[in-house]
Amino acid sequence: RGCDIAYDGKALILLGNDDLSGDSRIRLEKRDPILLQPIRSFGTDGVVVWDPTPGSPYDGPNAMALDQDSIYVAAHDRAPGSTEPRLRWHLAKFDTATGALVPSFGQGGTVTWGRSTKHHHEPSDLCVLGDALYIAGYADEFYWRIEKRSKITGLLDPSFGTDGAIET
């Protein structure tokens, strides 16, 4: 299923799901904006597939934002071993030209957040503003969480809210 679309000034970037044998994964495509042909230098033949939690049928895309060099993707999954809908936030940084995860961001290109004692954590949107990423979504079933993170390292900005996040 498609989730988001953006234009980087040269190409269309599409975000969606890639379900293979019950293993839901995140799919990015980079396409020519006129002919819609895949840009083959991106990922494998124009496609990058990212699996936040291998084997989980609950990995899903939520939102995407771009800057000059990077594609940021917010996604969710079900916490490993959980029998309840304990979804976690995932944030990934991909190189715009190649589609590779940027290893200096978080751990190997990704950041994960979620409390194991609560239930529903799911990002809804994200944006790039200067050197920061703002991510908004659910923290538990009825509370919003807004994070401010470094777009370079993925670390929370401790000057924002309480330790980098505001929950309401």
Image: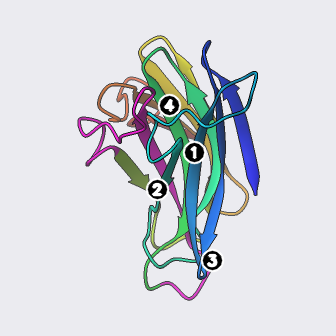
Give above or below for 131 relative to 118.
Answer: above
Element assignment for label 4: strand
- Decide which of tag 3 and tag 1 comes sooner along the chain: 1
- Decide which of tag 3 and tag 4 comes sooner along the chain: 4
Q: Are marks 2 and 1 in contact (CB under 8 Å)?
A: yes
Q: Residue at the spot x=49%, y=55% of the render?
A: 49
Work out how far the residue at label 2 is from the one at label 3, CA to CA, in angstroms.
21 Å
- Decide which of tag 2 and tag 3 comes sooner along the chain: 2
Q: Amino acid at mark 3?
A: Pro
Query: Residue 16: where, in percent of width, then height?
Result: 67, 51
Q: Which residue is mark 2?
A: 50
Name which quarter of the figure residue 76 lies in.
Answer: bottom right
Q: Nearer the viewer, mark 3 or mark 4?
A: 4
Query: Residue 146: where, in percent of width, then height?
Result: 58, 37
Residue sitting at the far bottom: 83
- Decide which of tag 2 and tag 1 comes sooner along the chain: 1
Q: Nearer the viewer, mark 4 or mark 1?
A: 1
Work out how far the residue at label 2 is from the one at label 4, CA to CA, in angstroms.
13 Å
Whether 81 is among the magenta residues is no
Q: Amino acid at mark 1?
A: Leu
Q: Which residue is mark 3?
A: 85
Name which quarter of the figure residue 22 lies in.
Answer: bottom right
Element assignment for label 1: strand
Work out how far the residue at label 4 is from the one at label 1, CA to CA, in angstroms.
10 Å
The segment highlighted magenta reads 82-109
Q: Which residue is mark 4?
A: 71
